[in-house]
Image: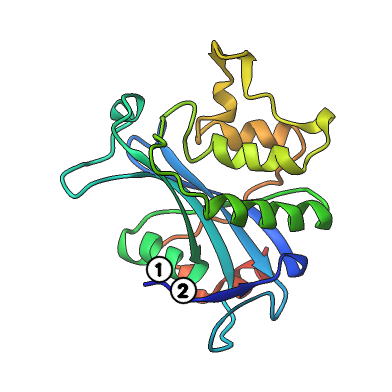
Amino acid sequence: RHANALIKPDMVESVYFVKKPFPPKWLAAHCLYLFTFKPGGLINADGQQASGLVLTIEAYQRINQKFSLTDGLKNAFGSTWILATWEDYSAQSCGLNNEELFLYPLKISHDQKRELVAESIRQAVVNRQGEYYNTITNNCTNNLLVLLNHVLPRNQQIKLWWIPKMVYNFRATMPVLAPKYMIKKGLFGAPLPVLNGKNYFAGLDQILKKH
């Protein structure tokens, strides 16, 4: 379901890099951004406030397709950028699918958070017809770090290629490796307690207050 919303980047409060593992969990996960706002920073046309805004970059699958890491190397899927409320995303992931969400706070300035929100929205509305998802070079994780590079000074930017166009930095593209890599670089904080089907419904505000 689509709805009109007013998003005020100046009123961003926190940004979280979210990891959502899926089988085989030692190897595979999906990653996304969660932006939280001060009151009035994210409201719909009826004036209702959402807990947060999610940006998730995914492999677009047709009805007869099922995602696999190997097919993601073969131009089998389109690339789609989706904006959703935290309420909808967490209910689907934790409530319906019984998945786990790990939230890592980004350690960047308010100005950088504001620009990251704005750039994420700009990129989310780009027409990506003809663009293909790639498990290594155009996936859910490395695109989040590309967005982050946009707001970082040059000396803090994440190096995506060890050898340009030849050897990719897998720590910047593999969801299971990226959080530890970014914590080591000082850009992510330690993860919050895991969210799952047993606690997500407590509400994001209550969960964050306990952290």
Residue 150 appears in the picture as rendered? yes
Q: Is residue 80 above or below residue 136?
A: below
- Specify the amino acid type for callout 1: Ala
- Can you tell which quarter of the image residue 144 is in? top right
Q: Residue 130: where, in percent of width, then height?
A: 38, 37
Tag in front: 2 or 1: 1
Residue in front for this viewpoint, 201 or 164 = 164
- Residue indicated by mark 2: 201
Question: Would you say 108 lies left or right of 39 here?
Answer: right
Mark 2 vs 1: CB contact within 8 A: yes
Q: Is residue 69 above or below residue 45?
A: above
Q: Residue 185: where, in percent of width, then height?
A: 75, 32
Q: Residue at x 62, y 18 (%)?
A: 161
Between disc 2 and disc 1, whose residue precedes?
1
- Residue indicated by mark 1: 91
- Specify the amino acid type for callout 2: Phe
